[in-house]
């Protein structure tokens, strides 16, 4: 579902781009109007190497309130020159999959209603990109802004962004920088991002970065979606916490992390969907890993071929205010799961296929007692690998009769107080006998001690010492 009217309109334009790009090639551009009331000028796959100076009359006759899509997908363009004016309330232009190396200043000056621009799959460098490209009409000695909302710069040769790149695009909400050799988010790139204060979507996938400076997202208070997949992160960057109040979606697939822990998602209190998949080195999910994610609704933890351990406290502190509705644990190296990992009965959809499940009591508790069996999608029912007698069986068909039922049958009864009325004759006799034995043993010990003392005095008694006055002894005279 669309989250807002603007995004719906952009999706409609994207759909139209895809349809236009797929159309058969010809010597001239083709124009049409589709069911969405979008006028399309399809110049794709026409071997065009120079942009036209004017649009066909069909485009010029478009009503002012209509949407316009112009696509130059898959041509031989090397340079974007200034485009002629185009009517329409919202205009989208695609230069995807050319060999563009340069863009002229004021290239889009005549298109103040340009909302979508695709420059992906070209040979554009950071030096080519500068704020002057997006200058709008010149009035009263200053350049106006343009309405640009979506800018796709993916699959180019960009290492860095000019700090003033977004000076004339205050409405920019979606920026795609994926598959560029950025490697390091340097100071000027961060300054450039800081000026895009309305940014909602930022794609940094496959840009070879391994860290994000702490202040990189400062000021981006509306950022909702971030894609960091296919990079070199050893841990989830702490800088994401700066946009924790607005961030709703995070893609952290295909990074060389080894573990997730209680520091991984600190501050991401508004995150609703998380993807952590295809991580070749991820082995364990530790205690309190997901505890900060108080709004999480969808968790994709899939295709991590070494992931074999998830702590039973991974969701510590969340179970009383549970928000998760979909959990996907497919294609990992899991064999067991703690039955108290999460309140399984509160989920709507569960994915667990492609693991080496040991069908033990915990798994039976999850699937049968807590009702996980009802949450598997049709055709996505996992099966047992062990023990041998259950190997190959669907886990929904396993019944483990020897597992405890955890009822109150064997709960100890409360002990009652012991009163004098509960005394029996044998109790009295045993009490007298016990006292007598204590007295007898005491007497024997006393006699033994006296005998030892007497023997000691008789045998080892010391002789008295005689003192001599040497003054009276003549032998010393």
Image: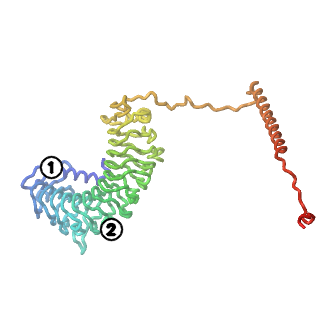
Q: Residues within 10 Å of mark 2 (few under 14, many from 20)?
A: few
Q: Establish if 419 lies above or below 148.
A: above
Q: Residues within 10 Å of mark 1 (few under 14, many from 20)?
A: few
Residue shown at the point (44%, 42%) measured from the top left = 341
Instruction: Report if residue 376 is visible in the image.
Output: yes
Which mark, by number, is residue 465?
none
Q: Confirm or deny contact between disc 2 and disc 1 (CB under 8 A).
A: no
Q: Establish if 380 lies above or below 69.
A: above
Q: Nearer the viewer, mark 2 or mark 1?
A: 2
Instruction: Report if residue 89 is visible in the image.
Output: no
Where does residue 441 sit, x and y in percent of width and height?
A: 78, 34
Q: Give the side of residue 452 with respect to residue 392, left or right.
A: right
On the image, which quarter does residue 157 sit in? bottom left
Where does residue 131 sit, x and y in percent of width and height?
A: 25, 68
Q: Residue furthest bottom?
A: 141
Which mark, by number, is residue 187?
2
Q: Quadrant of the C terminus?
A: bottom right
Where does residue 167 sit, x and y in percent of width and height?
A: 28, 68
Q: Earlier in the sequence, mark 2 or mark 1?
A: 1
Q: Real-space Cα distance between discs 2 and 1?
A: 40 Å
Q: Which residue is label 1 attached to? A: 22
SS at mark 2 in the image:
helix
Q: Nearer the viewer, residue 354 or 467?
A: 467
Q: Residue furthest left?
A: 27
């Amino acid at each position: 579902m669309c989250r807002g009217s603007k995004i719906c309109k952009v999706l409609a334009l994207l759909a139209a781009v895809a349809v236009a790009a797929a159309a058969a090639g010809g010597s001239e551009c083709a124009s049409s109007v589709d069911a969405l009331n979008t006028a399309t000028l399809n110049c794709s796959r026409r071997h065009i190497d120079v942009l036209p100076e004017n649009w066909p009359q069909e485009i010029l006759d478009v009503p002012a309130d209509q949407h316009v899509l112009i696509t130059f997908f898959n041509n031989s363009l090397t340079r974007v020159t200034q485009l002629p004016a185009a009517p329409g309330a919202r205009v989208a232009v695609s230069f995807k999959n050319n060999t563009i190396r340069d863009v002229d200043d004021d290239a889009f000056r005549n298109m103040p209603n340009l909302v979508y621009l695709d420059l992906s799959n070209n040979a554009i460098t950071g030096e080519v990109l500068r704020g002057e490209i997006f200058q709008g009409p010149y009035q009263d000695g200053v350049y106006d802004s343009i309405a640009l909302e979506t800018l796709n710069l993916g699959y180019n040769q960009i290492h860095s962004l000019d700090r003033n790149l977004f000076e004339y695009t205050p409405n920019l909400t979606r920026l795609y920088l994926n598959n560029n050799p950025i490697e390091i988010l340097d100071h000027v790139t961060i300054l450039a991002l800081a000026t895009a204060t309305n940014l909602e979507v930022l794609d940094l996938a496959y840009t070879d970065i391994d860290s994000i400076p702490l202040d990189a997202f400062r000021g981006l208070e509306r950022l909702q979606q971030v894609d960091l997949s296919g990079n070199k992160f050893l841990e989830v960057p702490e800088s994401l916490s700066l946009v924790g109040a607005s961030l709703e979606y995070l893609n952290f697939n295909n990074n060389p992390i080894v573990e997730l822990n209680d520091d991984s998602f600190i501050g991401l209190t508004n995150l609703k969907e998380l993807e952590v998949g295809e991580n070749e080195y991820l082995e364990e999910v530790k205690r309190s890993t997901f505890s900060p994610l108080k709004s999480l609704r969808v968790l994709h933890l899939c295709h991590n071929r070494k992931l074999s351990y998830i702590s039973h406290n991974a969701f510590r502190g969340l179970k009383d205010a549970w928000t998760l509705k979909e959990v996907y644990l497919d294609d990992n190296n899991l064999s067991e799961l703690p039955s108290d990992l999460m309140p399984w009965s509160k989920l709507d959809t569960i994915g667990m296929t492609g693991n080496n499940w040991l069908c033990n009591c915990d798994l039976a508790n999850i699937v049968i007692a807590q009702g996980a069996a009802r949450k598997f999608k049709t055709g996505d029912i996992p099966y047992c690998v062990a023990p041998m007698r259950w190997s190959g069986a669907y886990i929904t068909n396993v019944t483990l009769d020897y597992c405890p039922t955890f009822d109150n049958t064997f709960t100890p009864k409360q002990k009652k107080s012991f009163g004098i009325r509960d005394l029996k004759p044998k109790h009295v006799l045993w009490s007298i006998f016990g006292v007598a034995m204590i007295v007898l043993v005491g007497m024997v010990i006393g006699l033994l001690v006296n005998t030892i003392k007497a023997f000691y005095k008789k045998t080892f008694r010391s002789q008295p010492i005689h003192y001599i006055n040497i003054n009276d002894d003549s032998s010393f005279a």
